[in-house]
Structure formats: C-alpha cells, structure tokens
C-alpha cells in the first residue's frame, strides 16, 4: 500500500537526445506523481522542449529510460500513439493547433471520428467540442465553424488544453502555454489548469518562463541547464532569487 | 467628405471579407455579360454553350487534381505530360484488351502521381522541382513509346489503313460529345465535392496545408498521406485523359501541352490560395468555366490568339489580386 503510493506515475531517467552534432538534451531526469503539477524551467535552448518531446513520443531518445506506472517503455514502442495510450498528452509551444482548421477539428486532432469508414462525423465532433468547452467553463467560443486563427490567443490556448484533457489523459504537458498571452488570458489558462487538476486529478508538466506563475501553480520545480536537469525545488523552499540563480548558473 | 465616410461604412472589413468569397462568381458573371454585350447571339447561342460545355470538362477534372495537391501546399506541374501518357496507355489498353482496357489510362495517371509523391516525400525534393522534372520525363516517354504517332479512336465507318493504329469504339466517341461528356463531368464533380468536403481525407488535405508539423507531432503519418494525395490527383488526371481521348478521338504525343498552366489558373481563378490550407471545389468549377469562356469569347470577338493569351494573363492577376486575403498569407514568395 505504502509502496503503491510512492511509485511515481512517470519516471524519466537519464534521458538524452542529440540532433546531428547538437546535444540538445544530455541528462533529463525527473519524476511525476499523480495529481501533481511539476514545473520545468530553464533558459532558452536549455533542452526543455526536447525533453518533453521525448516524453511525448515525438522523439526517440538516444539513451535513458522512461517508466510509466512502473512499466518501462521499450525503445521499439517509443511513439506518439504509444504515449497517448499511456495517457500522455501535450500542448506544444507554437505547434499545438492547425490554424486554418476549426475548433472541433483541433480538439479531435489525430483522432477524427468516422462515419462509414471514410466520412467525418461532424455532429459527434461538434457535440463533444461543446461538452469539453462547457466542462472548461469556456463560454467565449461560440462559432464552431470558424478557423481557430480567427480566435483570440486565450481561446486558442483553451482549445489546445481542451484537446489535451478531453480524452481522459493522466498526464498533460504544457510547453510555455502562456508565453504569447496577455495577463487576463494568462489568468484564464492558470484557472483552467487548477480546475482540471482539482476535478480530474490530472498531473501536469508545466514549462514556463513566468516564475511567478510557476510558484503559483507548481508543487515542485525542476531546473534545466545546458541539457541537464540540474536542480529540483519543493514548493516551500522556492524563492525567486534561488530560482533565477539556478536557471542562469545551473546551481 | 461625407461620401468617403459613407463608402467606408459600406466597405467594412467584414463585408470586404464576404465580398472576396464571391469574387469567382462575380467574375464569371461579368465575363459572360461582357461577351454577350460584345458578340451578342454569336456568344449567347445554344450552339456556343454546347461547345463550352464540351470544352470545359477535361480542364475541370485537371483543375480538381491540381486543387487536391495545391490544398496541401504543394503543386503538380506534370499533369500535361501525364495526360498525354495516360491517354496513350488508355488507347493502348483498348488495342490490347478491348474496351475495358481504357481503365489502363486511369491507372497510368495514378502511377505518375504516385511516383511524384514518392520522390517528393522520400527524397524530400520540393514538389515544384519534382513535377517539373516529371513533366519533361513523362513527355519524352510518351514520344518514345508512341514513336511520334497517334492512336485514333474511330466509329468504324472508315476502316483505317493498316499502317495507322486505330481502335473502333463509337461508344467512346459519343461519350466525348455533349451531353454525355457534360453528365460525366457533373458526376465526377459531385463525387469530388463529397470527397473534398465530407471525408477525413479531404479534411486532412486542408490540415496538411495549414501546418503539417502539428500533424506530425500528434502522430499522423504525413509522408504516406502526401504520397496518397499525389496518387489520387494522378488518378484524376488519368480520368481526365480518358475523357480527353473520347473528346479528341485520338491519343497524340502532343496532347495536353501547357494544360498544367490552365489547371493552375483555373484553381487560382477559383480563389484558392496556392499557399495551401484552403480551397473550394465549387469555385474551382467556376474557375475552369471562366477560363474556357474567356478563351471562347475572345475568339468569337475576333481577338487574335496571342492577344487573348495576354488578356487571360491579365485576368488571372486581377482575379487573384482582388480575391487574395493577404491577412491569411504571411509570406509572399
Ligand atoms: N529538431 C531539432 N533539430 C536540431 N536541433 C534542435 C532540434 N530541436 C532542438 N534543437 C536544439 O536543441 C537545443 C535545445 O532546444 P529546445 O529543447 O527547444 O530548448 P528550450 O525548449 O529549452 O528552449 C537548442 O540548441 C536547439 O537549437
Ligand atoms: Mg521550448
């Protein structure tokens, strides 16, 4: 019983990844527990996005292990669809949505429901979209036939997050979800995250440059420096000073 | 002063946006009215419209093929040569296997399209370059295979000499005439509309044109999808080639020369941005008709062919300048 409670939902151990000559990630190591918000901070180019793309299955790591619910993900099965089956969803920085498509399409991205094998089940998509938006208390998105590029940044981010939580995933990864948003929209997204965590017990990995936001939302903070997850803080031991120092100096 | 404020109120951004949507329809209406005014009954006759209805289908099907590819953000300029190749193989198929052999023409188009898709996706060579090379190669292949001679479709009334190859297929020739050719075109148009607007495949065309990186990140295999797109477009070219064979009554090595440009122009006249992500089957049909009508109208009005080409070019630029929503296109290349 005790053992069960301690076993992390996700455990990333010494994961590395390089692109050609660039070692984007040298040693990514962290654990994520159920219902927890874990923040990953670090300066630009520190390897944060690469780390979460590996976790999401978009990149196959060069080395290291990823263990989900006590089961290691075999190298051969390391793919987006496998990670989705394991309950991991990502809202990518800049690449979360297809701008010329509608909100329902984006919500169903990668799992479009079919009728008769080849046709789009548009009714099902619209209904589910309304359901998810209502669940998230998003009332500003009304016209579901518009391309999402005509919506505000906050509305787009709501749909992106809606997409990640709509399928009952256990782990939602947010890569700089409020970097492009104004203060009101940022608050809206933060409310969404807290709300979803409270109601569904979803775990979040949050990448953010906004240290105030990180301190508001996160239970623990992992600092990434030059491709290494160098330092970890608990919520109660964080001060902005120590964080900034860790981000810029690695310690 | 009052006038400018009034016109400003009438042309609100939202209204301009809506108006843009209708540019292809307005353009075709204006073009018809203009030629009616210039040439009167010589243009607005049953005979002339029958001619236009007979003239448009091949271009329309080629424009459909182009539309699919353009929607994904790529382009296919090999279709003129592919048309000649497909028509030739269709005719050869009929020589070898009888009437049903015509289907070989459709598959030949699909094959050219698939080769395009394979080269683009696997060798990562841009579609413009790949299909330009295929335009040259496939035309050469047609000339080599045909040895520069044509295969004729005859109705059996004149028996050809032994030294020319011909196929007796009166049914095919009658399919190439109004109204059969028009009915075939209408059926294909309807099916294409359903395919483009209602299927998961059609939806994915627009999504790939929107941002294919996002699709890759959610695990969609964009590479195989693109190969399928070019193959599907190729099948459509093959179908167009069979229709062209019926209409022209011969498969010649020169068939479809420069017609890839007409197909692109028809798509553009239909308001489809060549940058991908958007498109409309209905407006592409309008675009194909506009192109045919302008060419026909200028000929009837007595404009020499070279000048009518100039007029077509100007029309193309004007239509795109008006219909292009620059806020949707961030970079002009
Ligand atoms: N697909 C890629 N190909 C080549 N280099 C990459 C790729 N992705 C990231 N990099 C490089 O890896 C390093 C880390 O990038 P990234 O993980 O995006 O950092 P962060 O998200 O922390 O800003 C950078 O130097 C970046 O240029
Ligand atoms: Mg990043």
Image: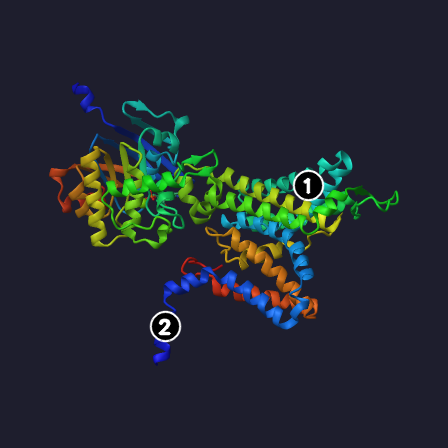
Earlier sequence position, callout 1 versus callout 2 = 2
Question: Residue A89: image x %, image y %?
Answer: 32, 36
Question: Residue B311: image x %, image y %?
Answer: 61, 68
Helix, strand or loop under label 2: helix
Question: Is A176 displayed left or right of B17 in the figure?
Answer: left
Establish if B106 lies above or below B57.
above
Q: Give the label on residue B8, or none.
A: 2
Residue occupying the point 32% across, 24% down: A72
The lab-note entry on whether marks 1 and 2 share a chain reads yes
Helix, strand or loop under label 1: helix
Establish if B83 lies above or below A228.
below
Say which chain tag 2 marks: B
- Ligand 1 quadrant assignment: top left
* Total marks placed: 2
Mark 1 CB lies closer than 8 A to ligand 1:
no
Residue A174 seen by the camera = no
Disc nearest the viewer among 1 and 2: 2
Where residue B330 sits, quadrant-wise, is bottom left
Quadrant where the N terminus of chain B sits is bottom left
Q: Which residue occupies the foreground of this view, B275 or B244?
A: B244
Q: Dot 1, crowdedness within 10 Å: few (<14), some or many (≥20)?
A: many
Question: Residue B145: image x %, image y %?
Answer: 76, 43
Question: Is A22 displayed left or right of A170 in the figure?
Answer: right
Residue occupying the point 62% across, 40% down: B110
């Amino acid at each position: 019983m005790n053992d069960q409670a301690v076993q992390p939902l996700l455990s990333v151990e010494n994961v590395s990844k390089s692109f050609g000559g660039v070692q984007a990630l040298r040693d990514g190591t962290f654990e994520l527990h159920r219902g927890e918000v874990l923040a990953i901070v670090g300066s630009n180019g520190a390897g944060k996005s690469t780390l979460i793309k590996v976790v999401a299955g978009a990149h196959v790591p060069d080395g290291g292990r990823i263990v989900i619910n006590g089961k290691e993900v075999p190298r051969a099965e390391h793919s987006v669809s496998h990670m989705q089956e394991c309950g991991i969803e990502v809202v990518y920085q800049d690449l979360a949505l297809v701008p010329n498509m509608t909100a329902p399409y984006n919500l169903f991205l990668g799992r479009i429901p079919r009728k008769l094998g080849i046709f789009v089940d548009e009714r099902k998509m619209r209904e589910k979209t309304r359901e998810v938006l209502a669940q998230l208390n998003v009332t500003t998105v009304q016209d579901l036939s518009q391309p999402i590029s005509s919506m505000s940044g906050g509305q787009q981010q709501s749909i992106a997050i809606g997409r990640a939580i709509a399928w009952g995933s256990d782990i939602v990864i947010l890569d700089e979800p409020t970097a492009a948003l104004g203060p009101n929209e940022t608050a809206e997204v933060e409310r969404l995250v807290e709300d979803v965590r409270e109601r569904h017990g979803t775990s979040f990995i949050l990448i953010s440059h906004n240290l105030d936001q990180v301190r508001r939302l996160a239970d623990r903070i992992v600092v990434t420096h030059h491709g290494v997850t160098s330092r970890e803080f608990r919520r109660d031991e964080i001060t902005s000073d120590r964080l900034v120092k860790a981000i810029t100096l690695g310690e | 002063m009052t006038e400018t404020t009034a016109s400003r109120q009438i042309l609100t951004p939202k209204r301009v946006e809506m108006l843009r949507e209708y540019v292809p329809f307005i353009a075709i209406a204006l073009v018809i009215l203009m030629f009616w005014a210039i040439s009167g009954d010589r243009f607005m006759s049953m005979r002339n419209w029958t001619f236009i209805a007979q003239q448009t289908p091949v271009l329309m099907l080629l424009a459909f093929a182009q539309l699919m590819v353009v929607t994904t953000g790529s382009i296919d300029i090999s279709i003129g040569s592919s048309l000649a190749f497909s028509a030739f193989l269709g005719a050869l198929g009929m020589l070898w296997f009888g009437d049903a052999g015509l289907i070989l023409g459709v598959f030949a188009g699909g094959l050219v399209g698939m080769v395009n898709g394979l080269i683009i996706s696997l060798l990562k060579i841009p579609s413009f370059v790949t299909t330009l090379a295929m335009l040259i190669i496939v035309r050469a292949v047609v000339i080599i295979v045909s040895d520069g001679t044509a295969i004729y479709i005859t109705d059996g009334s004149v028996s050809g000499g032994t030294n020319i190859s011909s196929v007796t297929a009166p049914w095919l020739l009658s399919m190439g005439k109004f109204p059969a050719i028009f009915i075939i075109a209408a059926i294909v148009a309807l099916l294409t509309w359903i395919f483009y607007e209602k299927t998961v495949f059609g939806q994915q065309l627009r999504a790939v044109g929107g941002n294919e990186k996002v699709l890759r990140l959610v695990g969609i295999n964009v590479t195989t999808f693109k190969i399928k797109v070019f193959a599907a477009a190729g099948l459509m070219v093959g179908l167009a080639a069979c229709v062209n064979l019926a209409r022209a009554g011969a498969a010649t090595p020169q068939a479809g020369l420069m017609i890839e440009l007409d197909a692109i122009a028809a798509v553009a006249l239909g308001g489809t941005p060549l940058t991908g992500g958007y498109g409309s089957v209905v407006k592409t049909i309008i675009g194909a008709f506009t192109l045919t009508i302008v060419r026909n109208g200028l000929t009837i009005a007595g404009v020499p062919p070279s000048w009518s080409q100039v007029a077509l070019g100007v029309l193309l630029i004007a239509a795109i300048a008006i219909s292009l929503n620059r806020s949707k296109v961030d970079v002009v290349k």
